[in-house]
Image (cartoon, rainbow, N blue to C red):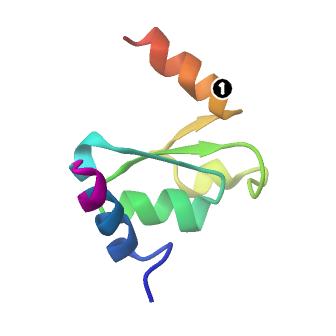
């Protein structure tokens, strides 16, 4: 089965869009299936504090970026340009 949190799933998406894992950012609200799974194959990750997010999830993936919302992430990324 091909789906999150399978590393094959993330590799298939990266292959489809033609992007290397170190050039991509996985954004999600599920710390295990989105963030940790993506980081396990070398993707950068951002945990969004909405949806499946629960208080304290960021401690389970301390290397991941954490933002309150997708809009906040976009604003932060635009500021670093």
- Give the x, y percent position of residue 38: 41, 60
Asked whether 62 or 18 is in front, the reply is 18
Q: Quadrant of the C terminus?
A: top left
- Is 64 magenta? The answer is no
The number of numbered badges drawn on the structure is 1
Q: Which residue is mark 1?
A: 71
- Give the x, y percent position of residue 5: 49, 73
- Give the x, y percent position of residue 73: 57, 28
**Quadrant in the picture for residue 74:** top right
Helix, strand or loop under label 1? helix
Q: Residue at x 34, y 52 (%)?
A: 43
7 vs 25: above or below: below
Residue at the bottom extreme, as displayed: 1
71 vs 5: above or below: above
**Quadrant in the picture for residue 42:** bottom left
- Give the x, y percent position of residue 6: 42, 77
Judged left or right of residue 18, residue 5 is: right
Q: Residues within 10 Å of mark 1 (few under 14, many from 20)?
A: few
Q: Magenta span: helix, strand or loop, mainly?
A: helix
Residue at the front extreme, as displayed: 16
Asked whether 16 or 65 is in front, the reply is 16
Q: Residue at x 59, y 38 (%)?
A: 66
Q: Residue at x 45, y 89 (%)?
A: 1
Q: Residue at x 72, y 42 (%)?
A: 49
Residues shaded magenta: 15-19
């Amino acid at each position: 089965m091909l789906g999150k949190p399978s590393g094959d799933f993330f590799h298939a998406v990266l292959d489809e869009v033609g992007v290397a894992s170190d050039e991509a950012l996985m954004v999600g609200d599920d710390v295990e299936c989105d963030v940790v799974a993506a980081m396990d194959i070398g993707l950068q990750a951002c945990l969004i504090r909405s949806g499946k997010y629960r208080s304290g999830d960021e401690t389970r993936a301390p290397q991941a970026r954490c933002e309150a919302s997708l809009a906040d992430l976009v604003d932060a990324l635009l500021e670093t340009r």
